[in-house]
Image (cartoon, helix red, strand yellow):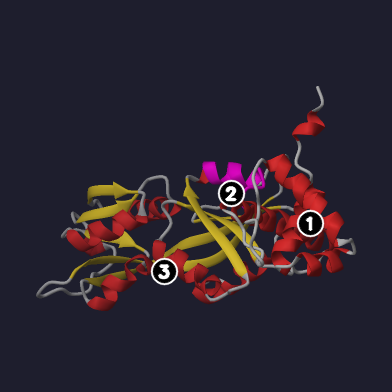
């Protein structure tokens, strides 16, 4: 079986791509250093292979058909990726828009993510994607080179089979917050928590483990109303319930600013750590280094 007959001729595709970008057979032929008639023949071969006309016939100007527009979009992506590959292997910054693929643990604070990614929002030279999932799912994608970095509030230890780097990018304070009401006063930590109804992060988090250890040492017993892994849900419950909630202030930043919630006390010695997790790459994405460096003002 001749599999070559089923393959696309990328030489012909590049000719079509140049014709479309130049918007003229004459200019494209000059750029490619071929005759206009030879270029027309190559274009015809591509159309026969695809089974569709790529330009409207009978027009004085080159006008793409629907199939032509679709083909051009794919050709743009193909040749842009080729240029990026050459730049990456040569250690040069990409000439086209740079791409970065970010994974974020689904339970991570949305406010923290927004603050971290804010510098990317103003960069017209960067195209980025953000995927959420469990830490295990995201690490699998990182190892498969489908992600450049994973954002997490849990460090991932390396082992003999992989060079994992958990970069500490921020350390946020932790507070106990609650709804504002008449007579609300600061809490005396930890004594005033004895018997209090509280909403806490899930038991799998480092923050919860550290808080439980603090209460155990002080012989304080609280009433756990709910355990919530998702920081977005923790934020909603803190706002809507009457219970005290253990949470990094960055999670409820807007509610604290508006007065819907008040900080009853700052919990000493507790910090929420945030990590940018990467694997050792021979050709690392240069944007990751700048992203990690830009996180420094978020708090250490």
Q: Nearer the viewer, mark 2 or mark 3?
A: 2
User: Considering depth in this image, is 140 or 58 the residue closer to the camera?
Assistant: 58
| Residue 298 shows in the view | yes
Residue 15, numbered circle: 1
Label 1: few (<14), some (14–19) or many (≥20) C-alpha neighbours in 10 Å: many
Is residue 204 depicted above or below 108 in this figure?
above
Within the image, what quadrant is residue 184 found in?
bottom left
Is residue 184 depicted above or below 281 in this figure?
below
Q: Which residue is mark 2?
A: 156
- Choose the circle earlier in sequence order: 2 or 3: 2
Q: Nearer the viewer, mark 1 or mark 2?
A: 1
What's the magenta region?
136-147
User: Considering depth in this image, is 24 or 80 the residue closer to the camera?
Assistant: 24
Residue 295 located left or right of residue 207: right
Is residue 183 depicted above or below 43 in this figure?
below
Q: CA distance from mark 3 to mark 1?
A: 58 Å
Residue 139 located left or right of residue 250: right
* Secondary structure character of the magenta stretch overall: helix
Residue sitting at x 55%, y 46%: 138
Residue 173, numbered circle: 3
Element assignment for label 2: loop
Element assignment for label 1: helix
């Amino acid at each position: 079986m001749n599999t070559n007959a089923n393959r696309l001729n990328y030489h012909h595709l590049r000719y079509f791509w140049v014709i479309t970008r130049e918007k003229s057979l004459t200019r494209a032929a000059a750029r490619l250093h071929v005759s206009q008639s030879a270029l027309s023949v190559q274009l015809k071969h591509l159309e026969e292979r695809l089974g569709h006309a790529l330009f409207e016939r009978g027009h004085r100007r080159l006008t793409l058909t629907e199939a032509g527009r679709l083909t051009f979009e794919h050709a743009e992506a193909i040749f842009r990726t080729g240029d990026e590959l050459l730049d990456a292997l040569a250690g040069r910054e990409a000439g086209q828009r740079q791409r970065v693929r970010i994974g974020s643990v689904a339970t991570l604070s949305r406010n923290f993510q927004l603050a971290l990614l804010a510098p990317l929002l103003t960069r017209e030279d960067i195209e980025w994607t953000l995927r959420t999932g469990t830490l295990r799912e995201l690490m699998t994608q990182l190892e498969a080179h489908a992600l450049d970095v994973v954002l997490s509030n849990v460090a991932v230890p390396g082992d003999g089979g992989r060079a994992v780097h958990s970069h500490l990018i921020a350390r946020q304070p932790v507070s106990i917050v609650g709804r504002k009401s008449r007579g609300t006063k600061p809490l005396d930590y930890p004594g005033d928590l004895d018997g209090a109804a509280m909403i806490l992060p899930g038991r799998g988090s480092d923050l919860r483990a550290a808080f439980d250890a603090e209460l155990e040492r002080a012989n304080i017993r609280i009433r756990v109303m709910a355990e919530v892994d998702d920081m977005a849900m923790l934020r909603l419950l803190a706002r809507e319930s009457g219970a005290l909630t253990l949470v990094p202030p960055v999670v409820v930043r807007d509610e604290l600013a508006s007065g819907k919630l008040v900080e009853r006390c700052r919990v000493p010695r507790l910090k929420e750590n945030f990590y940018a997790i990467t694997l050792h790459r021979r050709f690392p994405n240069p944007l990751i280094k700048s992203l990690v460096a830009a996180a420094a003002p978020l708090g250490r």
